[in-house]
Amino acid sequence: MVASKVLQDTQRGLWIVDAQGTLYFYDGLSLKLALDSHGHAIDNVNDAAMAGNKLWLVRGKHAYYYAPATTELLRLTISQVPMEFVASEGDTIWFANRRGLYKMKEDDLQPAFIPFQHPLKLRGLHIEGQSVFVAAQSGLYELAFNGPSQFQLHFPKQHITDVFRDNTGTFWFGSLNGLYKGRDGERVEFIGGRYDLPISTLQQTADTLWVGSKQGLFAIDLDTQQQQHFMPSKHNDYALPGQRIIDLERDKAGGLWISTEEGISYLPQGAELFHRIRFGGGPDEIKAHRINDIVYTSNGTYWLATDNGLFELSGSLEILRHEPTLGNVDKISVWQQELWLLAEGEIRIYSRKKHTWRPLGLPHGSAEHPITSLKVDHYGSLWLGMRSQLYRYWPDTKEWISFGEHWLKDRWVMKTSR
């Protein structure tokens, strides 16, 4: 997927607008289309912002809000002039078109209009500190939240692509002609002596400023000003999926989501390197064709369920163990020192301590029903989901309990009692 916009949800997960303008939600496990109340995909999205429990969209040159909880998609009547950008700060939403800014609250959809002195050809809308910044062909215009409704011009005739204020209060301005530090516009020199690097997006994690460009990703240590440069490479653990950085988003865990023209990468909090592990037959490659499931264990390792058994990976994604004798493993769930597996159509219990496994017999009469899900709860009991049945297994008593039969019986009694 190529993402043009990545947004952190106020509760959990990410909202992603792809290069075609379609809205998706990523919950940490799977990517799903965002649907309206009629079940239609939300497409033609040009810009998006998150405020409160709603997404605020520029869609087909009109302003909208989308409420994920109710799937309500409402077009807002703001202006007959096409909308171009949207940004938010707290519960305040700002829409922009060539005539001016439209400021509204989540609970008050009647906007206050702040006109430009003359129509502007817009290039972006950014909110940082106590100001809203309007990037235009003629430069960058700043409107202070608590000041008079007057715009101050910065960087005349410059194409400003992003505005960012770090945790020390210093402003950074990205442009197609390089990176500027502070309101005075001190130009930043990049590795190799370049000043004119085209910048696309800025973000911060801990004490590092991340600078996305058309020629890779730069990390600037805010204490020492030392730089690192990350580029795509098929044979390098530092590699990104693509060279052109489109968007950067910091999540609540402090990790960094990096959108490129070749896909999305994630850098967890505290990680110093990008590490990609490949499929293949090499010594540092996963000897499988498909990963079916992944779990993270209490000792900091990852276990992969694949079509060629189990793989154990370290926290830095080094391969620690491979168990090919398990065959095709479809599902995996962890409980203390054991892994509960759906492998080769049966339930298997794998000991992480002894590295041995034993089969578990399926409940009577269930062999003809395919298992669709498997999960161990906090009591240590196993839940099996089938197409029309739900089973729970208690290891202490070695007892299977069927829930689907009770549901079907209750429904039948209700029908016959009429």
Image: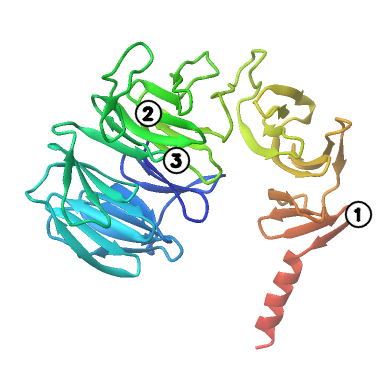
> Front-most of 180 and 257?
180
Assess disc 3: are there few (<14), some (14-19) or many (≥20) residues with their C-alpha within 10 Å of its C-alpha. Answer: few
Rounded to the nearest angstrom, the CA distance separating label 1 from label 2 is 56 Å
* Amino acid type assigned to the residue bearing label 2 in the image: Gly
Residue for point 22% across, 51% down:
60
> Front-most of 247 and 135?
135
Which mark, residue 167? 3
Which callout, 3 or 2, points at the residue further toward the start of the chain?
Answer: 3
Residue for point 48% across, 30% down:
208
Which quadrant does the N terminus fall into? top left
* Label 2: element kind: strand
Which mark, residue 339? none
Q: Residue furthest bottom?
A: 418
**Residue 359's quadrant in the figure?**
top right
Rounded to the nearest angstrom, the CA distance separating label 1 from label 3 is 56 Å
With respect to residue 396, does 226 lie above or below? Answer: above
With respect to residue 233, does 47 lie above or below? Answer: below
By what rule are the colours in the image chosen?
A: rainbow
Residue 61 position, x and y percent, is: 20, 52
Q: Can residue 112 be seen in this view?
A: yes
* Amino acid type assigned to the residue bearing label 1 in the image: Lys
* Label 1: element kind: loop
Residue for point 81% across, 54% down:
381
Residue 328 position, x and y percent, is: 71, 32
Residue 190 position, x and y percent, is: 36, 18
Which mark, residue 212? 2
* Amino acid type assigned to the residue bearing label 3 in the image: Asn
Assess disc 2: are there few (<14), some (14-19) or many (≥20) residues with their C-alpha within 10 Å of its C-alpha. Answer: many
Assess disc 1: are there few (<14), some (14-19) or many (≥20) residues with their C-alpha within 10 Å of its C-alpha. Answer: few
* Label 3: element kind: loop
Q: 410 left or right of 263?
A: right
